[in-house]
Image (cartoon, rainbow, N blue to C red):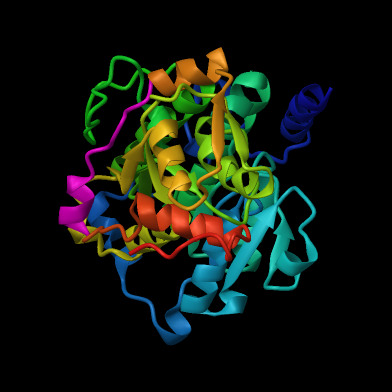
């Protein structure tokens, strides 16, 4: 019923004239903002990459801000640009500590008119689009994933192009598929994912690059590995085991993993991920040789992660109850990513390897009396 109601809302929006061009739903052509002016070339978009300071600091909007990365990104950006210059948004009610930490708005990425209002009323110049259903959650609800991950993207691309925003949309290791090179996966290779999440992210990469070449949109994208963060709940991703293992190890000394012991995947600590996101957004346009980059930090299997946990918690036990759906997804993803282009073009460098990651996560979850600091 939620999906039907959402689609009915879209149809009513068209009928009520909320969207200037409803035929775009079938044609896919973003003509409503073009007017009679000639298209921008990438060279015309160079003003997007000017350095910001003082009164010229960017005005930032983050969609899907209550997911795994939004709050942390907002905190990082507010330290850099000022609290009032960064607006967090979502369709969920924020907890008190988020609501009172800085500006928060209700924003549904399926509501094009509302997105435009937010951008205009708040003079937004940078947009971070995090609204999406992740891999496992998307497979459980394909119609909703298609609506949020694809239709929401259409709206964000059009708003960003219309108002000349600098736009960041994350991609993922899920954008690769079983026919992609796995060890490592390069920036450019065959991409034939088999999840709605992965398909929507390949579409995101291609549409962002198209809008860059066709309309001069300053689109920037990173393919995230599995992201491990201490202060957020797993959000329906295949790599969630690498988040959940730490609180379970502290609370009970046991963890049941839903992937095979040998399922090696690329991973990154959230602090590195957020820093990489800000760095690529802040990079001069002339330093970027592509619109979508791989980034990587470490690569490990559940067994290797458990062995590192055992160094701190000798009585820890891991068992395996493999979920065939999740395992099939993991088997279609790269074991590691080649991020040499990011390191060369804009100086990407990670800080956290596996030992630092495990120590940080265990200490966060309260094992301060049992966890030794990494040497």
Q: Which residue occupies the extreme front position in the image? A: 315
Please indicate, yes or no, whether residue 251 appears anywhere in the rendered image.
yes
Q: Quadrant of the C terminus?
A: bottom left
Q: Residue at x 17, y 46 (%)?
A: 340
Q: Is residue 70 left or right of residue 30?
A: right
Q: Is residue 289 left or right of residue 219?
A: left
Residue 344, compared with residue 308, is above or below; it is below
| Picture quadrant where residue 65 is located | bottom right
Q: Residue at x 53, y 65 (%)?
A: 60
Q: Residue at x 39, y 28 (%)?
A: 175
Counting labels gives: 0
Residue 196 belongs to magenta span: no
Q: Quadrant of the N terminus?
A: top right
Give the magenta part as a residue range.
Answer: 332-346
| Picture quadrant where residue 316 is located | top right
338 or 301, which is in the foreground? 301
Position in image of residue 117 (x %, y %): 67, 57
Position in image of residue 45 (x %, y %): 30, 58
Position in image of residue 102 (x %, y %): 67, 73
18 or 312, which is in the foreground? 312
């Amino acid at each position: 019923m939620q999906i039907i109601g959402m689609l009915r809302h879209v149809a009513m929006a068209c009928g009520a004239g909320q969207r200037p061009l409803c035929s775009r739903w079938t044609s896919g052509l973003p003509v409503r903002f073009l007017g009679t002016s000639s298209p921008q070339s990438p060279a015309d978009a160079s003003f997007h990459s000017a350095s910001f300071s003082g009164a010229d600091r960017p005005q930032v909007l983050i969609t899907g801000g209550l997911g795994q990365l939004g709050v942390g990104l907002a905190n990082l950006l507010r330290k850099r640009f000022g609290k009032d210059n960064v607006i967090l948004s979502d369709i969920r009610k924020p907890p008190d500590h988020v609501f009172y930490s800085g500006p928060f708005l209700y924003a549904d990425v399926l509501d094009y008119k509302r997105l435009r209002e937010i951008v205009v009323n708040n003079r937004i110049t940078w947009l971070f689009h995090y609204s999406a259903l992740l891999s496992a959650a998307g497979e459980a609800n394909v119609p909703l994933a298609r609506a949020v991950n694809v239709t929401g993207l259409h709206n964000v691309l059009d708003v960003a192009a219309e108002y000349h925003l600098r736009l960041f949309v994350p991609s993922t290791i899920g954008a690769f598929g079983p026919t992609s090179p796995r060890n490592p996966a390069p920036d450019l290779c065959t991409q034939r994912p088999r999840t709605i999440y992965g398909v929507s992210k390949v579409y995101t990469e291609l549409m962002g690059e198209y809008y860059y070449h066709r309309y001069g949109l300053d689109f920037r994208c990173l393919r995230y590995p599995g992201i491990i963060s201490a202060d957020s709940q797993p959000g329906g991703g295949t790599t969630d085991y690498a988040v959940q293992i730490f609180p379970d190890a502290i609370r009970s000394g046991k963890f049941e993993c839903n992937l095979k012991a040998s399922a090696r995947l690329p991973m990154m600590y959230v602090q590195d991920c957020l820093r990489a996101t800000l760095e690529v957004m802040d990079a001069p346009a002339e330093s970027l040789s592509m619109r979508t980059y791989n980034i990587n930090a470490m690569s490990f299997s559940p067994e290797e992660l458990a062995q590192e946990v055992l160094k701190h918690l000798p009585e820890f036990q891991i068992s395996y109850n493999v979920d065939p759906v999740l395992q099939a997804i993991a088997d279609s993803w790269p074991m590691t990513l080649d991020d040499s282009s990011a390191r060369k073009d804009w100086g990407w460098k990670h800080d956290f390897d596996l030992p630092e990651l495990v120590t940080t996560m265990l200490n966060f979850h309260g094992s301060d009396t049992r966890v030794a600091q990494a040497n």
